[in-house]
Image (spheres, grey):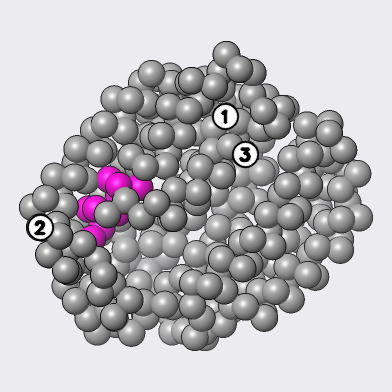
Amino acid sequence: MGRPAFWVVSVVPYYVGILLATHRLVPEVGDWPRLAVGALVMGPLLWLSVLAINDAHDLPGDLLNPRKSKSPLLDGRVSLTEAKRLAVGAGIASVVIALFVGTTFALGVLFAVVLGFAYSVPPVRLKTRAGFDVASNSLALGTFGPLAGWAAVDSDLSGFPWLMALQGTLAAIGLYLPTTLADLAADRAAGYKTIAVRLGARATYRLGFAFWIAAAGLSVVLAALDAVIPRSMLALEIVMVPVLVAAYRRFIGPGMTFKGVVILASLFLFPCGTFALTYTGVL
């Protein structure tokens, strides 16, 4: 129910926030226990909460979706009631355990749990409100992830580099929009008005491509201005932008699969890794 493969999607931005706050690749040893608790919350607990409640309320659509045939709810391993209890229990545990990291961090986790439930549970059900489905997921990963990592180190958010949150959110939108295409047929059959259903496959793809170009372009601007991204990375950013844009065209399309998103995200890790080494003074 918790989809372990998804945990890295939030733990990596969480680590980025830690790196931004500490200017260190590896935090001080004394901070490890607190930061590990934060990773437990950001990975297994939050994902279990939001995915279990999503599975519970997506059941009618998942019955029409061959990709979801191995879902614990569909094959009878978990009942609908049990899924809802798991979601609530994991959500409560997330907030309670987050208090051991810090109050600011815990308030952010509470917001993430509420947003996760708002995404799936009627009558709000942001998943079926085109635009809000994209915003809720992309802000959660691109902004909340790094912000949570920063808050786990420093409860004072005044120094948080919001330009990096913007860049991360633009990239998250570019990566998230194509994933809505994988379930387009099932969502359309179930009557879910996701952005892909509302816009169609080609327009959704083009919108994702535009946000991806914006994210890549912003990284060049930030490096040129020496704003968070060191100017020493400018040459690399100029080289990587066309590579990332070309990769999007190559691996992502209106009829894409999740494999393309994984390949593209892996390529994106190269400039991210270089940034980490440069930002912390290793390079």
State which tag comes first along the sequence, 3 or 2.
3
State which tag comes first along the sequence, 1 or 3.
3
User: Magenta stretch mostly in which secondary structure?
Assistant: helix
Q: Is residue 252 left or right of residue 181?
A: right
Q: Is residue 214 visible?
A: no
Q: Is mark 1 in CB contact (under 8 Å) with mark 2?
A: no
Which residue is rendered at x = 87% and y = 56% of the image?
236
* Residue that badge 3 annotates: 16
Determine which quarter of the picture holds residue 133.
bottom left
* Residue that badge 1 annotates: 150
Which residue is rendered at x = 70% and y = 74% of the image?
247
Q: Is residue 197 left or right of residue 266?
A: left
Type of amino acid at the residue the image marks with label 1:
Trp
Q: Nearer the viewer, mark 3 or mark 2?
A: 2
Magenta includes 51? yes
Q: Is residue 168 left or right of residue 280?
A: left
**Depth check, front residue: 131 or 202:** 202
Q: Position of residue 80 (x, y in %)?
A: 10, 58
Q: Is residue 144 above or below residue 266?
A: above
- Which element carries disc 1, helix, strand or loop? helix
Residues rendered magenta in the picture:
47-55
Residue 79 - label = 2
Q: Is residue 44 above or below residue 27?
A: below
